Amino acid sequence: MQTFNLSANIENGFAKGMQYIVTPNAQNVVNNLINGFKTGIHSYTIIGTYGTGKSSFLLALEADLDKKNRSKYLLNPKLLSECTEFEILNIVGDYADLSVLLGRKLNMEGASNSVLDELKAYYQRLAKENKFLLLVIDEFGKVLEHAAKNNPEQELYFLQKLAEFVNVPSRNILLITTLHQNFSSYAKSLNEEQRNEWTKVKGRFKELVFVEPVEQLLYLASCQRRGVHTAIEDEDTFRGIFSLGQTTKFLKDTLSYSTAKQLYPLDPFAAYVMTQAIQRYGQNERSLFSFLAAKGQGSLNEFKPQKCMTYNLGIVYDYIIYNFYSTLKDVHFDSTSWSVIHSTIVRAEGLNIWASQREMCDAIELVKAVGLLNLFGVASFHMTVKELACYAKDAMNISNAEHIINELIQVQLFRYAEYKQRVILFEGTDVNIEEEMIKAGNVVPKPVNYADELRVFFNKRVTPVKAHFYQRGTPRFFDYMILDSPMDIVPSGDTDGVVELIFSTRNDALDSIKEFSRENEHALVFAVFNNTKDIIGHLYEINKCDYILSKVLIDKNDKVAISEVKKHKEYEELKLNKAITDNLFFYNKNVTWVYRGVEQEIMSHRDFNSLISHICDEVYYNTPIMNNELFNKAEFNLQMQQNSD
């Protein structure tokens, strides 16, 4: 097992025996620093929540710049500067004026110069020795909190002057600060004028996000567990759990089996949930490594795996409840979900349908598992009754899981939600929703002339014309409209072009659109939908939901049923918009693109952007090439008005 510390302090350096593991996210942040520095950006704010490893990242970066004990974690110093040495000023943020903290670091007690003058003099001395100055302020949020409460105008002015001094492109100086949240978040107590100044100062710093994805945190966890040998009881079964996670899309493809194997006896489902829970309710890597290192009852290190028994979702539920109890008791985004899990457990305990105490306990473990799977699963995650029973059998040692799941469905604690294709916790209703959907299908007609209906559910969107903007300096935007036949639309206002999405029932629709567009001189491009089976299917499901809400659940008393039908409708609306978008920008024969009477080959978003840029070049050819976008737009509109007069 590798050495792990709960926290790092940039003034103390790495603890003895510590090794920094470079992640793609950390490398990406370094690349942004190097590339930004070369373009003249010298002031940065690295933003990441508690425990994401920002301080360790800074220590690794500094270790690479240390001439005497140079490491090779993140970068070759020559990529940043040709200076022979790097001088580092480390400041750990405190509730004090930044000028005071910087003055102390520069040993200014009793000095008559201002702090900025002293910093300039210090930099000049280093420049003469061909040294690079790196100024680091960790825990910068404390400084900003102090500034917001104590003379914010003066503190902001000092910070502005500091950033302006650092940001001179010719200077070999870099300022890096770290925050737990966005710069603007610290200005909530200020008045409007002060917030505007705060925003102006924020603009002097380039923000870099420091957030590790779940898969990367799991990789770090697997590295930390190297040397901890826990033999897998049945590798075929464990591999089956991993494959199930990929099949159900609970796991991402970027998680490797070797990483999952290294985390054993923690199974992949449990590992994903534990990591996400730690991100939401704990302090990221800090809490994750605390979990990995913990001893005692309920800990991973004390767990004794058996055949078909991993450190599973039920055990993870108990760990989260015990270790994050106070956080979960507070009102937060997930409060309702945790309350539903708890109430379902209580209801399961009170049932008299169980053949034995063991069966009741297994039912409770299944409730915990289903609750966590739905709380932390992505939208595309799906899990049938058989798949859930498979996990319960292989990871929770519940041999009769399918029987228990069906019992829980029968008593309405579980429900297999067709619209999500997964088992969910159910609070109970007298309405058989699946049966009502079938009945609605016999009453609600399938959409025929559906362009009008689609407009209601199609998310409003606008696409910027990138290449034309880069070349001409004028931002232009294309709007989208759903129509059953082409229209001669003259773009106006902020709209420079229109994408007409044509849903026609005519057999000769494509030919007529080609003819219509051949002589049209406006910035119009047509997307003709040839195969609308999926789109009509989602629209049909939406209409059935509307029928049930308006005709079946008329008295509005069954809140659970209403909630479930509304969720089904929302899901179908998302799928409807996705179906339209997927048909537009992923190469297939379902959509034919037409411009000026000619079919266009659109295989990607890039092809589409190339097309609309070409259209703008043709239609707005008189637009002058200038850097002032307001002038460009106003001048062109004036020309158009004069031409029409």
Image (cartoon, rainbow, N blue to C red):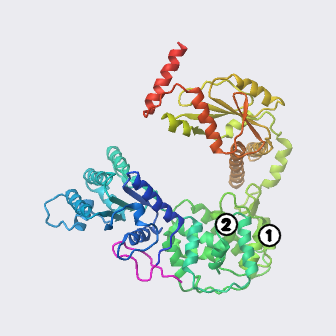
Q: Which residues are magenta?
A: 1-18
**Disc 1 from disc 2: Cα separation:** 28 Å
Residue 273 pos. (x, y %): 62, 69
Mark nearest the camera among 1 and 2 is 2
Choose top left, top right, bottom left or bottom right for residue 220. Answer: bottom right
Q: Identify the element where label 1 is drawn.
A: helix
For disc 1, the neighbor class at 10 Å (few under 14, some 14 to 19, many from 20) is some
Q: Identify the element where label 2 is drawn.
A: loop
Q: Earlier in the sequence, mark 1 or mark 2?
A: 2
Choose top left, top right, bottom left or bottom right for residue 264. Answer: bottom right
Q: Is residue 577 left or right of residue 509?
A: left
Residue 120 pos. (x, y %): 23, 58
Residue 61 pos. (x, y %): 41, 68
Magenta-span inclusion, residue 269: no
Task: Tell me the amino acid under the disc marked 2.
Answer: Leu
Residue ID for mark 2: 251
| Residue 263 appearing in the image | no
Residue ID for mark 1: 407
Compared to 198, does 261 lie above or below? Answer: below
Task: Tell me the amino acid under the disc marked 1.
Answer: Glu
Q: Is residue 183 left or right of residue 94?
A: right
Give whichever of 269, 8 is nearer the camera: 8
Compared to 141, does 242 lie above or below? Answer: below
What predominant SS class does the magenta segment belong to? loop
Compared to 628, does 265 lie above or below? Answer: below
